[in-house]
Image: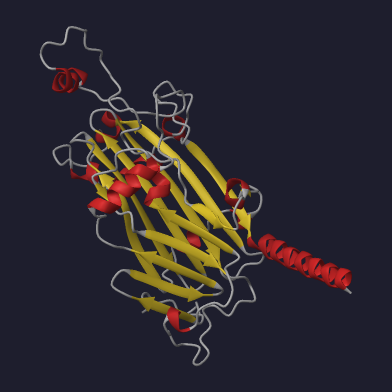
Amino acid sequence: MATGCNAAVAVPPHKRSDTETASAIEISGWRLTSTSLPISNGAEIDACQAEVGINLPEMFFGNNSLILEWFGPESDIGTPPTRPDSQEDVGDTKAENEPLWRYEFRAQDALKRVHQGPSEPGDGCVKVGHAEAWLKSRTGPAAESPMPDMVEVKPYDWTYTPLYSGHTSLPSGLDNDGFGPADPENPQHEIPIAELQRPDPILFYAEIPLYEDELHDNGLSILTIRIRVMPESLFILFRFTLRVDDVLFRNFDTRIYHSFVRNPPLVVRDIRGWETSYKTLKSLLPNPEDLSPLADPQWIARMLASMPTSSTMDRSSRRSTGWKGLGARVEVLDLSKLVNQAEGELSDGINALKLVDEKQD
């Protein structure tokens, strides 16, 4: 049921479906499906570990996902055949055709974008402080080689930092998921913060964990998705948060926005990465004796965003790891081009059939 109140915004026809493990909404030619299940079992973990090639995080939700499907401007997806204010189950009116565009968020795909192998410039692989204690725990007291100040401790990025912003699964083969650079002079090529701050009704909301790890008591690594659907738009926040104790904090956000009422139909993808030293962020605590905010991804993100970008987003900074995820970029996908592409492929198919018929005649 919708929450909030704003008489100026009309609620469009839409359909909801909710089960113990999945929720979906169909609205304005879209179907949005969130799946949230318990932590993966042993067999699922073994299978995924073999697929991605690294040890999995301690809490791995391999069955969780968020899937966005767009069926085109002429689709009746989300339009109930009876009362316009009804909320019939999504399963009552399945689409007769495939979506024109599908975008997914899955834990397995995120882990495939975690760096593997020896670190190279730009990989941003984090090294652990307290190297002496760390090495002693692995080499024993008889180790003769001197202890370096910092040492890499895993053959892959043990912090599980993913350079992943979701992925287009349909159509396949699109460069950069079909997104191109946004035009900074075009107001439709940016996420309208003021609109998202309005008290519009929330027709659909989900928060989905993908994985979490305490890094062997050295910090926190967590990946989550949040989606909310309003009468005129959808908004997604896909967030990775990293804390490595006494070393650094890192945040990698992907925000996705689409307006149901604007033309042309655009999907805006805003990708940003920040990092700063542990000491710097810790100094911003409102109460130095209370360290609990250091485990709060939202507080960490707010503090990083409030700091000068020259110190948190600049890969060339001497205080930076040089991680290639640092910085900001805004990209846009024009869904109308997918309609034109589909119509062109259909026309080509019809013409090919005509040629076959003519040859047979």
Q: Quadrant of the N terminus?
A: bottom left
Query: Is residue 202 something that shows in the picture?
Result: no
Q: Residue furthest left?
A: 141
Image coords of residue 253 (percent x, y): 42, 47
Compared with 272, 237 (above or below) is below
Which quadrant of the view contains residue 162? top left
Query: Is residue 231 something that shows in the picture?
Result: yes
Which quadrant of the view contains residue 92? bottom left
The one of 186 and 208 positioned closer to us in this rendering: 208
Compared with 26, 216 (above or below) is above
Image coords of residue 71 (percent x, y): 58, 70
Image coords of residue 121 (percent x, y): 46, 23
Image coords of residue 9 (percent x, y): 50, 77
Q: Residue at x 37, y 67 (%)?
A: 205
The one of 304 and 71 positioned closer to us in this rendering: 71
Q: Quadrant of the C terminus?
A: bottom right
Q: How many marks?
A: 0
Q: Residue at x 54, y 54 (%)?
A: 168
The one of 92 and 25 positioned closer to us in this rendering: 92
Q: Is residue 292 left or right of residue 222?
A: left
Q: Residue at x 75, y 66 (%)?
A: 349
The one of 146 and 55 positioned closer to us in this rendering: 55
Q: Residue furthest front?
A: 360
How did the renderer colour the structure?
secondary structure
Compared with 25, 131 (above or below) is above
